Amino acid sequence: MISDTEFQIRYALGMRLAILALAAAFSATAQNDSLLNYSITGSSDSTSPTENATYAMQHPEVQRLLLAVAASPRDRDYVEAALRGSGVSLDDMISNGSLRLEDGRFWLNFGLLTRGDQEIILRAANTYSQRLADGVLKRRAEIEALLKGYGLDRKAAAFIVLGCFSLDWDGLNYATAKGYRAKSPQRKSGSFFVMAEERGGVPLKQIYWGSSNSAYGKFGFTTFGDHFSPRNSTLWALRRQGPAEWRNKPISEFAQKVGPLMFALRQGPRAADGDGLLEAMAEIGWARKEGALYRAAIPVLTEQDRAMVTGLLRIGRKALEEWFGANYEDLKSALADISPVRNRVPFPVAFDQIWHYLFGIANEKLVEAGLFADPYAPEAAFQGYMPAVYVQGMGWLPERL
């Protein structure tokens, strides 16, 4: 459980700064002349540029330096001159993991993708993401049979369970366990990867690769989608929209009120009880009013859905196992010329970021195939993402890295 203050600190690192795990959203700096989008995978409570590279990257001098080093390793004089006036030192850049000294020069030491790198990855993803999507789609009949008994939107549930819980969360778990992806580095302020991308590259719309997550007791709350459209329908948005007496109470207390009500809506429609919460849920799209009753309008996954969820996760794991066994080494060769690899960053470190492109584009293809709900459908209450509420701590969902 996290406090309101801690959430605000973590969220400031970027939409994809995970509260409990990955999240992915990319965040741009406040400056209009920002060259990079950047984020972390993992969690950190530090705002120090010495400990968390995303805070060093708020300075344009640092961004320009990193792009220059991505093109070619630089000597000490170049790096120190480039940082002059930023308030960030060379020692900071070494300490936060952005740069490393090797062969008398300073090299890029994390996953930074230039526009050219993004184009290389996108070309590869056209092949390798389709193969991942095909691995899911060949089991479509089995997937739809499992979803058949779900009482809410089945395609929305597939988007959350297969797109988020499986390809995102379990994909990261599986890749790490097998050594395809490095373990998140343990740092003074947390355990996380740092990643950055040059702005103006591949459009992020419809690349469904990022979750923002929180958990309070047995109630888990997630939004999952792309990082093109803002996410305006969160637990915090509901608190602002909801009954006045809850607006200044801790989010943890509010979650303990919202969670049981959403679980009750999983059982069937309910009438409003006069406190205004169901009305607020309808306002932000979590519920839908039909006559005098309210129904759940987002995926809600409770203990009664265990068999469906675990069955879908088994299918997703099979698709992951097949994909990695058949494609990882070929993908590694196809991406030999991207900046992190040329800077001798181990491929399993760079793969954290690469995998987000791969499964994010695979999710886009699964939307196009009609297996998943379309977050950009004209009738969709949310654009580019989907919220979900689920039972937490039952040992049936993948750990979020």
Image (cartoon, rainbow, N blue to C red):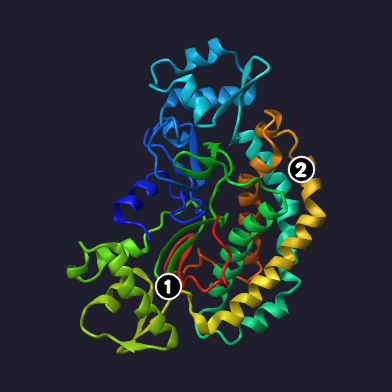
Label 1 crowd (10 A; few <14 / some 14-19 / many >=20): some
Name the residue rendered at 45%, 64% in the picture. Answer: 222
* Residue 332 badge: 2
Query: Which structural element holds mark 1?
Result: loop
Label 2 crowd (10 A; few <14 / some 14-19 / many >=20): some
Query: Which structural element holds mark 2?
Result: helix
At label 2, which amino acid type do we have? Lys
**How far from the left and from the top, in percent, is residue 361?**
63, 55
Q: Is residue 173 above or below residue 299?
A: above
**How far from the left and from the top, in percent, is residue 290?**
36, 86
Name the residue rendered at 27%, 65% in the picture. Answer: 239
Q: Is residue 249 left or right of residue 291?
A: left
* Residue 218 badge: 1
Name the residue rendered at 54%, 38% in the picture. Answer: 196
Question: Quadrant location of the C terminus?
Answer: bottom right
Q: Is residue 244 above or below residue 28?
A: below
Q: Residue 85 or 215: which is nearer the viewer?
A: 215
Residue 374 quadrant: bottom right
Dot 1 or dot 2: first in sequence order is 1
Q: Nearer the viewer, mark 1 or mark 2?
A: 1
Q: Is residue 216 above or below residue 201?
A: below
Q: Is residue 396 above or below residue 290?
A: above
Q: Is residue 193 left or right of residue 87?
A: right
**How far from the left and from the top, in percent, is residue 285?**
37, 71
Q: Is residue 241 left or right of residue 382?
A: left
At label 1, which amino acid type do we have? Lys
* Residue 235 badge: none
